[in-house]
Image (cartoon, rainbow, N blue to C red):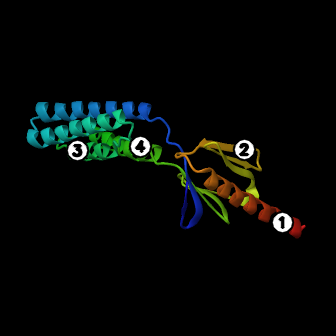
Amino acid sequence: MKKNQPFDYVVYLQRPDYRKYDLVSTILILIAIAGLSFFAFYENLNSLSYFIIIILLLYQLFVNRRLIKEEETAGFENSFFVIAVSFLLLPTDGSMHFIIAILYVVAAIFERQVKFQQQLGFDSNGITINSLPKKHYRWSEIQNALLKEGFLTIDLKNNRIFQKEIDLDISPFLEAEFNEFCRLQLNAQYLRVSSAN
């Protein structure tokens, strides 16, 4: 969590375990390598350019494996875009190449969304979540918001509860400051409603 413009506070949520996504992405790249190899060698295409693309894809897989072992976030989206372009540029006839390219573009977009670190911005207007589409909750929609022991809990008035682990340890002082900020916003909202009635 940190103070960040235009918000008073930005809370970064813990990233989930991406091993399943990484495994599926690796399999998709290996399938593409096999398909591109088939077209390059059996269709008598310009084998050198496809050989270079295959080497680049294998190198990216190697780099991603190292990142995963070091518990870093591996990115496969660039490989998916290279694969999509490679299938679009195949000189052989067939709409199947176009469909495969579209599927790899969708996989790249999906991977970017899945691995996008979720952040919540807090200000006097409410809470904004950087999801797709972006969500915004006004303080009038919130019953309580609290940060305690590494967990952010937002209790909405529609009986939904949002509880997630935050990404970094924060000091007790910053935690207390954040909780006081939320309490003041909720109290101000309560006073506005009370004076309106």
Q: Residues within 10 Å of mark 2 (few under 14, many from 20)?
A: few
Look at label 2 and name its amino acid. Arg
Q: Which residue shows up at 43% across the image and 44% down it?
A: 110
Nearest the viewer among 48 and 168 is 168
Look at label 3 and name its amino acid. Ser
Q: CA distance from mark 1 to mark 2?
A: 23 Å
- Residue 46 picture quarter: top left
The residue beneath circle 2 is 160
Look at label 1 and name its amino acid. Leu
Q: Residues within 10 Å of mark 3 (few under 14, many from 20)?
A: some
Residue 162 pos. (x, y %)? 66, 44
Q: Which mark is residue 191?
A: 1
Residue 117 pos. (x, y %)? 48, 48
Q: Which residue shows up at 22% across the image and 44% down it?
A: 86
| Residue 13, above or below 194 | above
SS assignment at label 4: helix
**For marks 1 and 2 on the same chain, the one whose residue lies earlier in the sequence:** 2
Q: Residues within 10 Å of mark 1 (few under 14, many from 20)?
A: few
Q: Residues within 10 Å of mark 4 (few under 14, many from 20)?
A: some
Observer-side mark, 1 or 2, equals: 1
Q: Which mark is residue 86?
A: 3
Q: CA distance from mark 4 to mark 3?
A: 19 Å
- Residue 67 picture quarter: top left
- Check the picture and name the quadrant holding the C terminus: bottom right
